[in-house]
Image (cartoon, grey):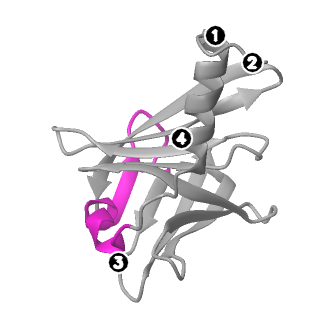
Amino acid sequence: MPERNNPTNAAWAAILLLTSLPVQAADINTLNWLAGCWQHDNAEAGNVEVWTRPAGGTMLGASRTVRDGQTVAWEYLRIEADERGQLSYIASPSGQTTTRFRMARLATHDVVFENLQHDFPQRIRYRQLASGQLLASIEGESKGQNRLIEFLLSRCE
């Protein structure tokens, strides 16, 4: 017979409850603050991420990483609503396999997308700071270690 007051059982019950709750639908227009051209601070010129304004249930994006005057990485991005209105972030980095990250959390000027089955990253976050800058981050486990990589971006033309 299972123990009723066992903290481990209570923790598992809470985890099962939280993971079984459906992600709430969100209006993609709530991500309008992400639209525009963003330049990586403290990086070589040309390191940018660009997002279109929401339209037709999607936002389209692209990023480019430049080192020593050469493009070393690029990525095509998309945020879209599925048939239930749940938002996903779809990334196609430098011609690699396309990966979908489902929205895990949405607050004012802060969004987190997650795919716990992906190698790295498992989470992608965008948060607009009070300064107007954008703090983008990728995080998760890689080679048994937790990693967090942050990118500070400012609006550009």
Residue displayed at 69% across by 13% down: 3
SS class, disc 1? loop
First-in-chain label (2 vs 3): 2
Residue at image mark 3: 54
- Quadrant of the drawing holding the C terminus: bottom left
Residue 35 lies, in percent from the top left, at 32, 66
Residue at image mark 2: 2
Q: How far is the residue under mark 4 from the one under mark 3?
A: 29 Å
Nearer to us in this view, 91 or 133: 91
SS class, disc 2? loop
Report the magenta residues as a range: 26-47
CB-based contact (under 8 Å), mark 2 and mark 3: no
| Closer to the eye: label 2 or 3 | 2
Residue 20 lies, in percent from the top left, at 59, 49
Residue at image mark 1: 6
Identity, as a three-letter code, of the amino acid under mark 2 = Pro
Alpha-carbon neighbours of circle 1 within 10 Å: few (<14), some, or many (≥20)?
few
Residue displayed at 36% across by 72% down: 28
First-in-chain label (1 vs 4): 1
Q: How far is the residue under mark 2 from the one under mark 3?
A: 50 Å
| Closer to the eye: label 1 or 4 | 1
